[in-house]
Amino acid sequence: MNFSSKLLENAVDAFASLPGIGRKTALRLVLHLVQQAPETSEEFADAIVKLRKNIKNCQVCHNLSDEPVCEICSNNRRDKSVLCVVEGIRDVMAIEETQQFRGLYHVLGGIISPIEGIGPNDLHIDSLIGRVQTGEVKELIMAISPTIEGDTTIFYISKKLRDLDLPVQLSTIARGVSFGGELEYADGLTLGRSIVSRIPYRKDE
Amino acid sequence: MNFSSKLLENAVDAFASLPGIGRKTALRLVLHLVQQAPETSEEFADAIVKLRKNIKNCQVCHNLSDEPVCEICSNNRRDKSVLCVVEGIRDVMAIEETQQFRGLYHVLGGIISPIEGIGPNDLHIDSLIGRVQTGEVKELIMAISPTIEGDTTIFYISKKLRDLDLPVQLSTIARGVSFGGELEYADGLTLGRSIVSRIPYRKDE
């Protein structure tokens, strides 16, 4: 693109450096900001700088947090005996959105992936074991992607817990045909698993 | 979305206020910035604030510019006798990109649209007439969208020039079947116009 303005070019470059934003989209966003009041751009910039400067990882669960310990971990009304183990903070948000889980989380920061060079020591597994060792945790729900890497990660953690003789219940989230999903469009693996892990019918469901 | 962090929520809100950016995309962009070095976020924010604070509209052609008069208008090697009249600065960029035009521009800032409440006085038409009145301009190329509003705008300008008895050549950009376009897929209006405005065949083309 041919910019007659260096300022414009710099701002477009900044937006275009973000994932999934091309230069045409970047230009559209920048021109939008130019057409707004100067305060809009200042508030926009301010939100980003403040975030990057002050955001922390929760010391307990490694979720993103404004404080050293996140809102979820410091909430006394949550069940400290159940930990939901997830790959990243987006998973925490998705599960919180459901309002079906009242326990705490543990963010691994990824999953074991030899191809990408991610080993167990790159993940927050030691601190997970540490939390279990306090004796307060009764169950770990592994809400990890059902991939080879995910299964490897779950296996690694379960082995480590067994080796240390830690009596904690391990579970994985249920896999099956999604609500509103049609049987014929479900993939074979999911459909097969949903039959193997069938659940007794209850009238009140 | 359920954010455990106010800082994160503010940054996502900021991105989601941009046109075409939903909250899921906004979150993805924000998490990208969080994973980069703090300098990346600072440079990003800096580019936006500097742009909004220092960007000007060229006093001559109303294009966006870093200086009171833009690079194109202050370029002595450009032909000052031909003005290309466009709706917005994106049109300037698109035409500059072609490298086929060596004259100057005039950005109207929109087109006459009674439905959207945009009248001639909301556009930079008076300053266009003023530039023609200096006597330096020999031709105005109207590179305006071929819509009813666009045609109205062209008609308004041509009438104003005639009323003031300003002897300037008015032209519009050629309409026709685009290069690489197949005849059968061209819309009827375009195809019809391309036959009416046919051009003599030259061997060297």
Image (tube, coloured by chain):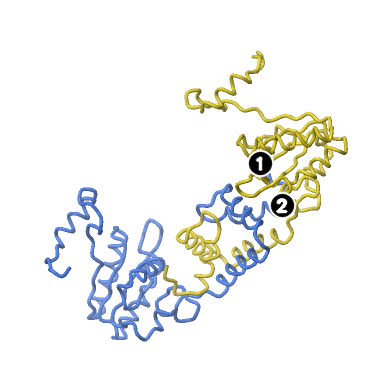
Chain colours: A blue, B yellow
Q: Position of residue B23 (x, y in %)?
A: 47, 61
In the image, B185: left or right of A199?
Answer: right
Q: Secondary structure at mark 2?
A: helix
Classify the position of the N terminus of chain B by image quarter.
bottom left
Amino acid at pointer 2: Lys
* Helix, strand or loop status at disc 1: helix
Badge 2 sits on which subunit? A
What residue appears at the point 80 percent right and 35 percent down from the top-left corner? B161
Image quadrant of residue B164? top right
Query: In front: A120, or B111?
Result: B111
Alpha-carbon neighbours of circle 2 within 10 Å: few (<14), some, or many (≥20)?
few
Q: CA distance from mark 2 to mark 1?
A: 18 Å
Q: Residues within 10 Å of mark 1 (few under 14, many from 20)?
A: some
Kindly identify which residue carries mark 1.
B91
Residue B48 place in picture, x, y as percent:
65, 60
Side of B31 where B176 appears, left or right: right
Q: Which mark is residue A6?
A: 2
